[in-house]
Amino acid sequence: KQLTDASLVIAKSSLSLASNDPPNAKQNVTDILVNWLRVQNEAAGNDKILAQFLQLLQQKFGVGSSDDETERFLRLTTEVVVESCVKSADATKGLRYDAIDGYSKLLSYLVIHMNGGGTSEQVTQQRLGMLNKVLGCITRSLVTSHEKAQQTNAPWDQRPWFRLLLDLVCELNTPNQLLDSMKSSIVNVFGSAFHVIQPLVVPGFAFAWLELISHRMLLSNLLLAKDQKGWGVMHQLLIDLFLFMEPHLRKLELTDALKKYYDGTLRVILMLVHDFPTFLAAYHLSFCNVIPENCVQLRNIILSATPKGVPFHDPINRNFKIDQLPEISQSPLILSNVVGPLMSFKN
């Protein structure tokens, strides 16, 4: 209930910010976007000219230097490009993503070239701060758009939002010497943003969300991060996924769409069993706690994950004696909160 109401709270917050916009603000950002798309097409690959455009944005419009102006610019430009994409819908060719792709380039340049001076650590924090602002504005706009559509019973298209977020995931996780030192922090920021727009909050974005969190540029970077720094974020995203599916799986009420969604969930888990079994084994307790007992297939797949480096012994072998295995003396890696569920039985 609280997560369902969260979308309404976010939408009200976004509308409150919009009430302070100047009358011509939307037209101004539209003009800026048109100029950016033209410059990007004409000077593709010329970082010097593109950097000059970013400098103009900072000096003339306060983007990157003023929090209020940055928020207004990001919010309005996001609305403009999504509206443009939706209006371009064609029965035969689908949506046109030119504006979305161009806009994602602008956002990635804003993050990559953000530099307010200071030490390298300070510049890194400035770039992460800009990424937080970018994803914060996009997620708020997404939730607001979805909430408006629900209240008016209007159709809502998740495709422009998916394309925009996917573009950013790919742009900012591609090897880049300016971002390599903050690679793990970048994927953590994306993971936190996707937690905000989880299916329980924005059910109309569920399919796009599943594809985003399982994308190779995000999932693998989270789970391959040094010292397991991304494991907690990926664990939370999978918990979000299972919590969304839980009531439907418990009642066995699966529409055709939910059956497809369950198939997609199985594919993600099977990939994790194959490529990242240690991660699944470390969090198997918390995963199984949110998966219904009658969902035997999914629970068994998770419980079948064997950490890398641990040999798999044949339990049917007559000479098999579990107490004589050398691995029996090694403590397993358990990252789930074991005490939490037990405390619920205290009273």
Image (cartoon, grey):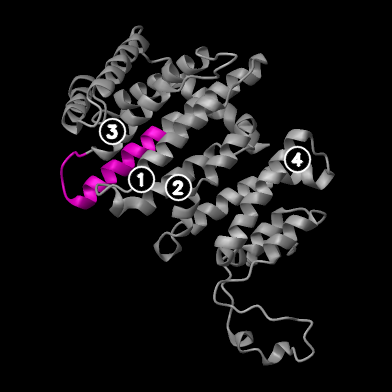
The span shown in magenta is 115-135
Q: Are marks 1 and 4 in contact (CB under 8 Å)?
A: no
Q: Nearer the viewer, residue 100 or 191?
A: 100
Residue 212 lies within the magenta run: no
Q: Is residue 184 left or right of residue 321?
A: left
Residue 129 lies within the magenta run: yes
| Mark drawn on residue 110 | 3
Of the residues shown, which amino acid type is indicated by label 4?
A: Lys
Query: From the viewer's perspective, is residue 105 above or below residue 293?
Result: above
Q: Earlier in the sequence, mark 3 or mark 4?
A: 3
The crowd level at tag 2 (other Cα within 10 Å; few <14, some 14-19, many 20+) is some
| Mark drawn on residue 259 | 4
The crowd level at tag 1 (other Cα within 10 Å; few <14, some 14-19, many 20+) is few
Q: Earlier in the sequence, mark 1 or mark 2?
A: 1
> Residue tagged by mark 2?
217
Q: Quadrant of the N terminus?
A: top right
The crowd level at tag 4 (other Cα within 10 Å; few <14, some 14-19, many 20+) is few
Q: CA distance from mark 3 to mark 4?
A: 40 Å
Q: Are marks 1 and 2 in contact (CB under 8 Å)?
A: yes
Q: Nearer the viewer, residue 59 or 157?
A: 157
Q: Residue 75: name its quadrant.
A: top left
